[in-house]
Image: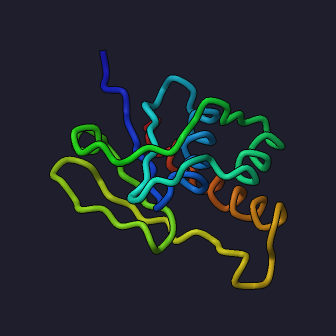
Amino acid sequence: MSHKPSVLFVCVKNGGKSQMAAGLMRTVAGDDVEVHSAGTAPGSAVNAMSAESLREVGVDLTGEHPKPIDPDLMSRMDYVVTLGTEATVDPVEGPTYLNWDTDEPSTRGIEGIERMRLVRDDIAARVDELAARLRN
């Protein structure tokens, strides 16, 4: 039996971008990829607008909640992906580390659900590319 690829998505609060990436990857890759998300300083809940923007494309985050990074989990991942510029992790041996410097529409004055849709679409394109790489 071949190795099932694995990925951990990390942002600061684990309420928005990393949850979006994980939900999108689960949808795109199904059971072919082990998917986790975590935060460097987890918040108290998933961002409601992030969840709403995902529901618009058929991704349901019901039951998800912010989680801290589990060092044991991180060490056995194939990929650890940080989203944005604020989340940083102390690398451990094993995973390949990627940083996705995601679009931040608020710097252009775009807020609310429109902001979340742009963030979602940027992350979705990156998830699709990573999913294709993991399948090979």
Please name whichever residue, 36 or 45, is drawn nearer the observer in this view of the structure: 45
The quarter of the picture where residue 67 lies is top left
The quarter of the picture where residue 116 lies is bottom right
Please name whichever residue, 55 or 42, is drawn nearer the observer in this view of the structure: 42
Q: Residue at x 43, y 38 (%)?
A: 136
Instruction: Count the labels in the image.
Output: 0
The quarter of the picture where residue 112 lies is bottom right
Left or right: 42 in relation to 54: left
Residue 85 against residue 2 in the figure, above or below: below
Percent across and percent down for residue 86 are 45, 73
Q: Residue at x 40, y 42 (%)?
A: 7
Q: Residue at x 35, y 67 (%)?
A: 88
- The residue most toward the left is 93
- The residue most toward the front is 44
Percent across and percent down for residue 97 are 32, 58
Q: Residue at x 66, y 52 (%)?
A: 47
